[in-house]
Amino acid sequence: MIFCGIDDSEFIRGKVPMTKQEVRILTLTKARIAPSDIVYDIGAGTGSISIEAARIAHEGKVFAIERNPAGISLIKENMKKFQVENIEVVSGEAPGALAGLPNCDAVIIGGSGRNLDDILDIVHERLKVGGRVILNCITIQTISSCLEYLRAHKDEFDYEAIQVQVNRLKAVGPYDMADAVNPIYIVTAIKKV
């Protein structure tokens, strides 16, 4: 049985950023990935989203785009650990690393390296009508750029944005206290034309 929401502790992580379980669940739910979908995971980091997306799209393929050599190694290690074979790791920085990839059904952007507008332009060309782009924005600058782009392209995309704040309880002596995970904006854009 395929399920979404592998425990964070199950992933081999190193010092590379990783999308936390609760945010991963929301991101993948918003992406609405189908079993035969082609998915881009841009800024794949450790590959946590790529792994979970590949398990959902078990008849399709996930392209994990990552520029950090440490991240690329971790994605490959996690692929072995979770026995996932339908991921192709693409070493490089988007948008250049997207050259030659097939059209896709869903795109998840976790890192854009300040190239968000150029990435979204190419994604728009490659994304099938009705396809979804999910952007996980950690900084105010990224959410601002993202919304500015989508407002300027409102004839091409419908979009929504939510902010998520997760707090985990941890034991502190005889008490349970909230331990905050950084808030994140999750933007869902659906291609209209």
Image (tube, rainbow, N blue to C red):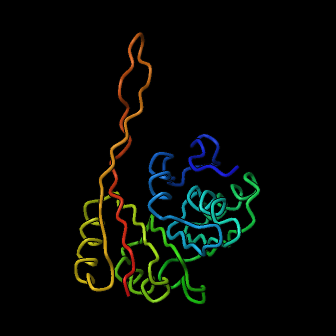
In the rendered view, does 50 fall on the left or right side of 159? Answer: right
Can you tell which quarter of the image residue 149 is in? bottom left
Q: Residue at x 60, y 75 (%)?
A: 38
Count up the numbered dots.
0
In the rendered view, does 179 fall on the left or right side of 2? Answer: left
Can you tell which quarter of the image residue 180 is in? top left
Q: Residue at x 42, y 12 (%)?
A: 173
User: Quarter holding the C terminus?
Assistant: bottom left
Question: Quick one: 1 or 83, which is closer to the camera?
Answer: 1
In the rendered image of this protein, does residue 169 appear above or below residue 40? above
What percent of the width, then of the height, locates residue 153? 27, 84
Residue farthest toward the top in the current orientation of the protein: 174
Q: Residue at x 42, y 71 (%)?
A: 112
In the rendered image of this protein, does residue 127 appear above or below residue 184? below
What percent of the width, then of the height, locates residue 58? 69, 65
Question: Quick one: 23 or 34, which is closer to the camera?
Answer: 34
What percent of the width, then of the height, locates residue 80? 76, 56
Q: Residue at x 65, y 63 (%)?
A: 54
In the rendered image of this protein, does residue 118 appear above or below residue 146? below
In the rendered image of this protein, does residue 23 appear above or below residue 45? above
